[in-house]
Amino acid sequence: MSTVEESMLRFAVAPSGFKECLDAEEVAEAIATGIRRVIPGAVVDGVPLIDGGEGSARLLASATGGRLIPVTATGPTGRPVEAHFARFEDTAFVEMAAAAGLSLVPAEHRDPGRTTSRGVGELVSAALDSGARRIIIGCGDSGICDGGAGALRALGAEILDAAGEPIGEGGAELLGAHRVDATGLDPRLSDVELTVAVNPRNVLCGPDGVARRYGPQKGAGPERVEQLAAAMSRWARLLGEHCGAELAEVPGGGASGGLAAGLAGVLGARLESRFDTFLASTDLEQRLRTADLVITAEGAIDASTALGKIPTEVARRAKRHGKPVIALCGTIGPGADTSYEHGIDAITGILTGPTALPEAIDRAPALIADATARTLRMLLLGSTLRAARDQRPAA
């Protein structure tokens, strides 16, 4: 391929972050480095994307010209953590992972039957203190499964047992819950627009409910998973009695350990697809429309990628414009092939051999750039071979 032809190539780089490693902006920069190493004249349109999970508040504040406001909040294990929320115009964005994320739970304490969302409610309260008229709560990367009960208590609600006494913290305690008392809720909540940005595929109860699907990832063994599944079913019944709506299988209700269902059932929060919330303010569609190749990325690509993760959402949109899509990832897990059914054309892992996790995290920018460059060299070789074939005289 000639230099002129290469210089005309345009790439849309639309990655997610690599959890507990790099945010989406840093991943996009590493991919761009790899592209320019092979095709110096390429046009690279970076569109780092957020899904509401870890790192979203910082990127959203940067993209909107807003600011991060630090808050000391109750962490998922009950200990104080240094959290934050983003503030721009009349809106506050609460990243629930900043106060209740899995990364805040030490490995030896990972038990979603005990962890709490209380700190998320404290961030909402701080957002109210800031004068926000609209509050968006981003779900993702949670270390909890308490149905939002902790967050609701932080905002003034009470979850009572059969004797009228408050239950304890953690999802397992919901097995003893008997009634929701919302009379003490912060009155300012009635004056704000409250939206929870969710993955609509996550539901509270049932075979694919939040406890069974995500409990093991958060440290729950088989017995604890079934206990939490029963707790979520009980919680769904109590929420239904309180608000008059069926929330057990409402799309998105299971987001962040059922936080979404709790906020919808008690606070009247609106559940909205996270991509409708976050992609509307980007120029992703225009970048996809003009790209020759789309590159997306996420820390791991496996069976869950097709269930509402950023790479397959990017691929779905890219296919509307007939664009090829490559996905980079740190690890390729079981079920990754299902992504091919959702618009991803090829998957490339960034590791070339056995690598300890700390080393992989430390070298992540270089590994991503190297993997991008290797992939593009293969693509250019294919293009060269095709051109040679087309120019070969007929036999």
Image: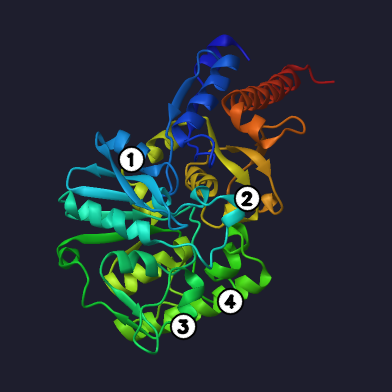
Question: In the image, what residue type sits under mark 3?
Answer: Gly
When the figure is inspected, residue 46 is found, relative to residue 39, above or below; the finding is below
Quadrant in which residue 328 is drawn = top right
Badge 3 crowding class, 10 Å Cα cut-off, few under 14, some 14 to 19, many 20 or more, is: some
Q: Could one spot residue 177 in this view of the protein? A: yes
Q: How many marks?
A: 4
> Taking 61 as reference, is 128 left or right?
left
In this figure, which residue is indicated by the disc labeled 4?
Answer: 227
Element on which disc 2 rests? helix
Q: Residues within 10 Å of mark 2 (few under 14, many from 20)?
A: many
Q: Which residue is mark 1?
A: 60
Query: Horizontal and vertical percent for residue 160?
Result: 36, 81
The amino acid at mark 1 is Leu
* Marks 1/3: CA–CA distance: 39 Å
Helix, strand or loop status at disc 1: helix
Give the CA separation, mark 4 to mark 1. 37 Å
- Return the mark for residue 176: 3
At which x and y percent is residue 126? Answer: 24, 52
Give whichever of discs 1 and 2 has the lower sequence position: 1
> Dot 2 corresponds to which residue?
339
How far apart in space, not on screen, are marks 4 and 3 (Cα)?
Answer: 12 Å
Q: Nearer the viewer, residue 196 or 381?
A: 196
How far apart are labels 1 and 2 at the CA level? 27 Å
* Mark closer to the chain start, 4 or 1: 1
In this view, the mark in front (4 or 3): 3
Q: Position of residue 393 (x, y in %)?
A: 78, 16
Which residue is painted at 54% across and 80% down in the image?
230
| Residue 187 position within the rendered picture, expressed as x and y whole percent measured from the top left | 16, 68
Of circles 1 and 3, the one toward us is 3
Is 176 or 276 nearer to us in this picture? Answer: 176
